[in-house]
Image (cartoon, rainbow, N blue to C red):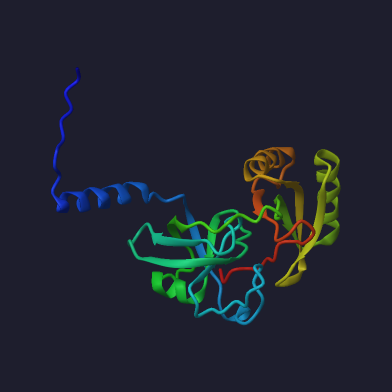
């Protein structure tokens, strides 16, 4: 017969243990650089369909579902802010998130423009299964260059199209594929990065809907 031993843990010990467990689970899901965007886009429609207000604590992310709440922490200073994902971006490969003006001020990054951050998901919104993933192969000032890239991507991967940037109609983005999962899109992105010179910065984006392009905007920096 196996003896069973019951150990009483003081209530305070339970609370401490719970806090330690919560801290252990609260690991950042992403690390990278954050930028911000403000006045030129204040009052414009975000990719989620909501109106962007620079004084609200919101952010743009390439793939997280709209309505997801995240904590953004500056790696260099420890300053943090909680924001709601309601827009798509950034569409510059070196950054993982673009913050509203209010959120940028909270982090003390308005003047520096770009800072290293860790992103922690606090509440994950339901996934929109109707919004597939694609790969942004590149952005072009000259439409003819975008068309050549689109033709190459279509020949290699079957699906590719060109969309204008919402904030700059003289810039053209080439999107490749329509994957149902982010993992499949990441695999495609890896292939795109190796398919031609100049495409090494290709990255995954979540489309707003199956037939609608992502809404893009340039950050302040």
State whether residue 110 appears in this view.
no
Residue drawn 50% across and 77% down? 56
Q: Is residue 217 left or right of residue 95?
A: right
Looking at this view, is 112 or 104 the one in front?
104
Residue 168 point in image, percent of width and height: 73, 71
Residue drawn 47% across and 67% down? 83
So how many labels did they put on this image? 0
Q: Quadrant of the N terminus?
A: top left
Looking at this view, is 107 or 70 the one in front?
70
Looking at this view, is 65 or 104 the one in front?
65
Report the residue that reaches farthest toward the top.
1
Residue 165 point in image, percent of width and height: 73, 66
Residue 72 occupies quadrant: bottom left
Q: Quadrant of the C terminus?
A: bottom right
Residue 7 occupies quadrant: top left
Q: Is residue 30 left or right of residue 132?
A: left
State whether residue 151 appears in this view.
yes
Q: Is residue 33 placed above or below 53 in the rendered structure?
A: above
Residue 180 point in image, percent of width and height: 70, 46
Report the residue that reaches farthest toward the front.
1
């Amino acid at each position: 017969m196996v003896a069973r031993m019951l150990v009483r843990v003081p209530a305070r010990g339970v609370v401490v243990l719970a806090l330690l467990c919560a801290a252990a689970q609260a690991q950042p899901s992403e690390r990278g650089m954050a930028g911000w965007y403000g006045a030129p886009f204040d009052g414009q429609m975000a990719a989620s369909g909501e109106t962007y207000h620079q004084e609200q604590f919101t952010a743009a992310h390439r793939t997280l579902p709209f309505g997801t709440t995240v904590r953004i922490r500056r790696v260099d200073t420890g300053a943090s802010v909680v924001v709601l994902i309601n827009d798509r971006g950034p569409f510059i490969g070196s950054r993982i998130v673009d913050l509203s003006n209010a959120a940028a001020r909270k982090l003390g990054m308005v003047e520096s423009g770009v800072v290293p951050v860790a992103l922690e998901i606090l509440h994950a919104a339901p996934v929109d299964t109707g919004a597939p993933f694609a790969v942004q192969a590149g952005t072009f000032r000259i439409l003819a260059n975008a068309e050549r890239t689109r033709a190459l991507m279509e020949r290699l991967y079957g699906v590719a199209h060109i969309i204008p940037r919402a904030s700059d109609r003289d810039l053209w983005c080439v999107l490749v594929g329509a994957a149902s999962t982010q993992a499949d899109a990441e695999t495609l992105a890896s292939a795109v990065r190796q398919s031609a010179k100049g495409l090494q910065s290709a990255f995954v984006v979540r489309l707003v809907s199956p037939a609608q392009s992502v809404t893009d905007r340039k950050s302040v920096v």
